[in-house]
Image (cartoon, rainbow, N blue to C red):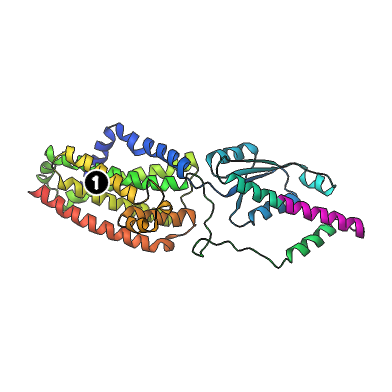
Amino acid sequence: MRVLAIVKTELTRTFRWRANIFFLLILPMGLILLLGVAFGNSSTRVGVVEKEKGQLASQLVKSLGDQPGLDTRNYDGLGSLEKAVERGNVSAGLVLGMDYDRRLQAGKTVTIQYFARPDSLAPQIRMAVESVVAAQGSTLVAARIVRDERGTTFQSALERVSALKAASPVSVNLLAAKGGKYPAASGQFQQSASTQLLLFAFLSALTGAAWLIETRRLGVARRMLSTPSSSREILLGIVLGRWVITLLQSALIVFFSWLIFSVSWGNPLGTGAIILLFSLVAVGAGVLIGTLFSSQEQAGPIGMIIGLVFAAIGGSMEPLQYFPSTMRKIAHITPHAWANDAFNTLLTNGGGLTSVWLDVVVLCAFAAVLLTLATWRLRRVLTT
């Protein structure tokens, strides 16, 4: 109960200062937006609205989804599709009209509504869509010829032509650069959300060192030691309080990035493990800094500098894939790089907890070392 009382005190002190709301939530959301626009992986996903799910319309959508590196997502109406394109959840939108099948089977032409994001992938996606549409068009033309020459039904002719095309001896297998599974399509803000979560969780924990120094300066720590609370309970309460604050900020970023930017956070177990462990790493670093300096004026700026430098080196300001190979290796001296690698596996490649076991082990090691040093130092400064 005494530990929980200390945790409650830490939470109360944090949220009593209203400016913390800005740093805990509003600023991260703003940077997610800015970095998503600047560095976001524009998706290779095409949104589709089928106003009537006919056979030919469904075949077109399936053929589009079968294209290497391309994915499709169905939407109920034009409004929801336009919103998805605006948010970067899809790079393009395709609308198939109510009479798509009827007109094509009658030998008439149809017009497909298509719109795309004004980014670098729009021309390539348009070419992929046009190639699929052209392939279906050539199949329909061939089916009409077979129907007219053999006097069979259009459906029978279409099945015969489709069977012949399916027997083609050439196929394409698209792989990632190292021969692995090609990354799944993701929204434009997917990567910026995870990198900013790491940036601000670490920064908040480091700047929280000033609160620890204030606790010592005001004599709060001495008063706690004069109570029946043991030094172990006080240490646990302080560390647990800072951890709860960091986790709360992370949870807010996860929730609001999902709500505002439709960010998918992947496998819950894997993502939860990375957030829990990285928060422990951040708290350990923050408490350690709070014990190494005697004034808030020293700890605040130094904590901010360390947090920003680690974030920059570890890929939380610019994605690691843009780094030279040597710099990517150097980046892994920071916990940010390991956590960013894990999020890339979880959110982009659809991995699970077992896919990021090495990142989990390394983050556990970072947390164990930093928390051990932090609690050792904290015990010394509180009892001397």
Magenta highlight on residue 152? yes
Residue positioned most to the bottom: 169
Prevalent SS, magenta region: helix
Q: Residues within 10 Å of mark 1 (few under 14, many from 20)?
A: some
Query: What residue is shown at x 52% (from left), y 50% (from top)?
Result: 186
Query: What residue is shown at x 43% (from left), y 43% (from top)?
Result: 255
Q: Would you place residue 71 above or below residue 358 in this image?
A: above
Residue positioned most to the left: 384
Image spot of residue 193 (x, y percent): 43, 45
For residue 148, which quarter of the picture?
A: bottom right
Q: Choose between 145 and 11: the one closer to the eye.
A: 145
What segment is highlighted magenta in the picture? 133-156
Query: What residue is shown at x 29% (from left), y 42% (from top)?
Result: 204
- Callout 1: helix, strand or loop? helix
Q: Is residue 132 left or right of residue 32?
A: right
Residue 55 is at least partly visible in this image: no
Magenta highlight on residue 98? no
Residue 119 is at least partly visible in this image: yes
